[in-house]
Image (cartoon, rainbow, N blue to C red):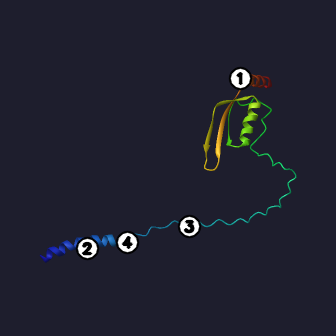
Amino acid sequence: MTTQKTAAAKPAAKTAAAKAAPAKPVAKPAAKKPAAAKPAAKKAPAAKATSAKPAAPATIAAPAAEGPRKRYRMLTGIDDSTFCQRVSDALSEGYELYGSPTMTFNGTNVIVGQAIVLKKAERKSDLKKAAKSK
């Protein structure tokens, strides 16, 4: 009977030894070298403000006077007075609201959008101007 016990013990010992054997070490990817630090640019001293009004944002541009205007535009931006002014300016240029406004939240600000289209009378006059310029 002793031979049967040792025969059964050998396969179990082999399995335990296989489990205990450490796996081959996995090579780690080489660490990236840190980028060379750029020296900080020196800032010029701030000039004193001469007027109380801040400069106009670069995103608001005057409409192009030349060429036909786009028949459809989608205005988007942060929900503030600047966006409302852009919509008002477009309405005074001959556009009309198209569809419902849309709103979403990006985690920081409420973002709004409004589709606008040229009024039919404005479209016809723009087409006539484009035909004359050709």
Say whether disc 1 or disc 2 marks the residue closer to the N-terminus. 2
- Which residue type does callout 4 highlight? Pro
Q: Residues within 10 Å of mark 1 (few under 14, many from 20)?
A: few
**Disc 4/disc 1 C-alpha distance (Å):** 79 Å
Which x, y percent locates residue 23? Answer: 38, 69
* Res. 79 image quadrant: top right
Q: Nearer the viewer, residue 56 or 124?
A: 56
Residue beneath disc 3: 31
Q: Amino acid at mark 2?
A: Ala
User: What residue is shown with label 2?
Assistant: 13
The numbered mark at residue 120 is 1
Q: Label 3 vs label 1: CA separation?
A: 63 Å
Quick one: label 3 or label 2, which is nearer the N terminus?
2
- Residue 69: x and y in percent read 74, 30
Q: Earlier in the sequence, mark 4 or mark 3?
A: 4
Q: CA distance from mark 3 to mark 2?
A: 41 Å
> Can you identify the residue that label 4 sits on?
22
Name the N-terminal-most of marks 4 and 2.
2
